[in-house]
Image: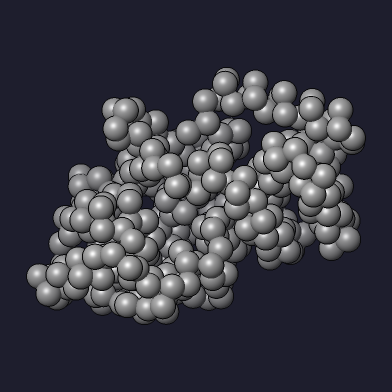
Amino acid sequence: MKLLTVTVPCYNSQDYMRRCIDSLLKAGDEIEILVINDGSNDNTGAIANEYEVRFPNMVRTIHKENGGHGSGVNMGMALARGLYFKVVDSDDWLDENALKRVMNALREFSRREDAPDLLVCNYVYDHLEEHKAHCMNYRNIFPEETLCTWNEMGHFRPSQYLIMHALIYKTDTLIASRVQLPEHTFYVDNIFAYQPLPLVERIYYMDVDLYHYYLGREDQSVNEEVLMQRIDQQILVTQIVSHLVDLEKVKKKYPKLATYMCRNISIMMAISSIHLLMIQTDDAYQKRRKLWLDVKMENRRLYNRLKYRTLSGFTYLPGRVGGKVTLSGYRVAKKVVQFQ
């Protein structure tokens, strides 16, 4: 069995996928690299085939019809043969030294009956062309290189949350969660980083800067203008996440995890609400209202908590004046926090 399966969803990735795959090959032959060619119409498929020929024991290429990022991740989960599973986007890469340390840890886990269900590592926002980088760590959340549960974790700062780039799931745990991502939809990594968490009984944190998250492409989904263009997909994923897990049930076993998961929904609600306000059309205002009403109809307890006890409530202030107050606060916070 391979120690780690890394799935690399690729769509028209010819210009940067080599950097990604080359970084993964540094792990040695205990890694399985699944390059998912998601219906590309450039040289992505040929490049993927080239790597499979050169590294037949490490690289598998899967060619499929276009289904979006989530479809590629789903395919990777279905085909994974590694003990652990990670997703690396084709324009991102892993640090060589950090990866070697992670592989050493996975090798040790493979010999343990109490292997962690989730390995958490740091990730780096990398503005490569601007020679700027910002690392996100979890030193205040988890003890370093020690097995722990959600009940032992600390408190998240406003800019901290568990995103896909920080996570390496045990494959069996991931499969048991039955997570399946929607096709032809952006922002589905939020589902991947959320739905399996209640099944995670043991967590292991390594203070290594493993994942480099490339920022700078104009068409990236995190680009503010792009996000507004794709706001319906952001709303869809927010709605899915808000309905996925019974947080009251989670709270009975892992109260700290339930608090974090509610906070995660709050962040997504805030992002959707703010960008709908930024669009500044009657249709966008109606979508914002419907988003909140849907949560209210589905789960009144969750709605009350989001509205009156979390940050997202400040993004749903009444009337146009309330909207202007929200946007003013967002712009100030953006300058102070310097998002991304």
Task: Please tell me which residue is depicted at 25% across the width and 70% down the height of the picture.
Answer: 45
Applied colour scheme: one colour
Q: Is residue 63 left or right of residue 324?
A: left
48 or 153: nearer the viewer: 48
218 or 209: nearer the viewer: 218
Q: Quadrant of residue 250?
A: bottom right
Q: Quadrant of residue 198?
A: bottom right
Considering only vertical position in the picture, is 106 above or below 183?
above
63 or 166: nearer the viewer: 63
Considering only vertical position in the picture, is 10 above or below 139?
below
Q: What x and y, as percent, mark residue 13?
A: 31, 58
Q: Could one spot residue 24 in this view of the protein?
A: no
Q: Could one spot residue 121 in this view of the protein?
A: yes
Task: Please tell me which residue is depicted at 67% across the width and 56% down the height of the picture.
Answer: 232
Q: What x and y, as percent, mark residue 208?
A: 32, 41
Q: Quadrant of residue 195?
A: bottom right
Q: Is residue 57 left or right of residue 120?
A: left
Considering only vertical position in the picture, is 16 above or below 36?
above
In which quadrant will I find the N terminus?
bottom left
Q: Residue furthest left?
A: 54
Task: Please tell me which residue is depicted at 56% across the width and 39% down the height of the picture.
Answer: 224
Q: How many marks?
A: 0
Q: What x and y, as percent, mark residue 176?
A: 53, 75
Task: Please tell me which residue is depicted at 48% across the width and 33% down the height of the picture.
Answer: 340
Q: What x and y, as percent, mark residue 325?
A: 79, 25
